[in-house]
Amino acid sequence: SKKAFIFDLDGVIVDTAKYHFMAWQKLADSLDILFTPEHNEELKGVSRVRSLEIILQLGNVTASEEEKQKWLTQKNEDYLSYIEKMDESEILPAVRETLEFIKENGQHIALGSASKNARPILEKVGLLHFFDVIVDGNDVTNAKPDPEVFVRASKLLGVSNENAIVFEDSVAGIQAANIAGMLSIGIGEKNVLKEAKYCFPNFLHMDTSFIETLIKK
Ligand code: G16
Ligand code: MG
């Protein structure tokens, strides 16, 4: 039966982490909170609301719901201004070729992202048409490591969890895939993504014969 190949967005398809970082840093600066690239690692795959909580904790800042809402809106407006000019040059290495190979082999492709901006980003980089199903931050209530985002994607495709394969760059995302009983493939450093069933530094290091093996499994 057909497999479902589920892709995370940020850190797997495109490197939007740098834009998230710029926007969060601008907010942190305005609140006199020290926020470094090292801190930013903790925000990978984490929802917008949770990211703000982590940053406020760094500065021991408490705030009303109203203030938090205002900051979340501000951060997103800044982020949107940074990603406005994104184009296909920002697709990570060999991602397009991998999507093409999976499509040519008649398999399902889904997006499973925490981002509420996933659709416009896929559109900007010209990859939207590859995706049979998109599940993003607008569709789910539980953030990774909760498997909701991936389970919803496989359900929509009518594929069982054991026939789903997840590409993820975050620890929380790998855990979510494992909890769902899906095959987890880490994109990044093996010593960080320890719990992934397989791990590759990027898609250039994953040849088509590996994907063929997954299809035939
Ligand atoms: C991405 C990023 C996170 C970001 C989240 C929400 O998740 O990794 O850093 O906080 O989306 O994004 P937004 O503010 O655009 O809704 P993923 O799951 O694509 O890696
Ligand atoms: Mg990610």
Image (cartoon, rainbow, N blue to C red):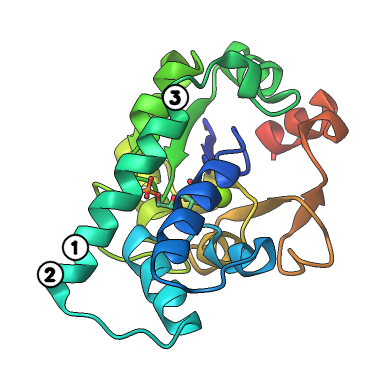
Closer mark to the observer between disc 2 and disc 3: 2
Residue 163 position (above or below residue 197): above
Viewer can see residue 140: no
What percent of the width, then of the height, locates residue 81?
Answer: 38, 32
Viewer can see residue 214: yes
Distance CA(mark 2)–CA(mark 1):
5 Å
Q: Residue at x 45, y 65 (%)?
A: 28
Residue 78 position (above or below residue 208): below
Q: Which residue is mark 3?
A: 122
Q: Is residue 114 left or right of residue 90?
A: left
Residue 190 position (above or below residue 120): below
Q: Which residue is mark 2?
A: 66
Secondary structure beneath disc 2? Answer: helix
Q: Which residue is mark 1?
A: 69
Secondary structure beneath disc 3? Answer: helix
Dots 2, 1 in contact, CB < 8 A: yes
Residue 87, by quadrant, is top right
What percent of the width, then of the height, locates residue 54?
Answer: 45, 75
Q: Amino acid at mark 3?
A: Leu
Q: Amino acid at mark 1?
A: Gln
Which of 158/8 is in front? 8
Q: Amino acid at mark 2?
A: Glu
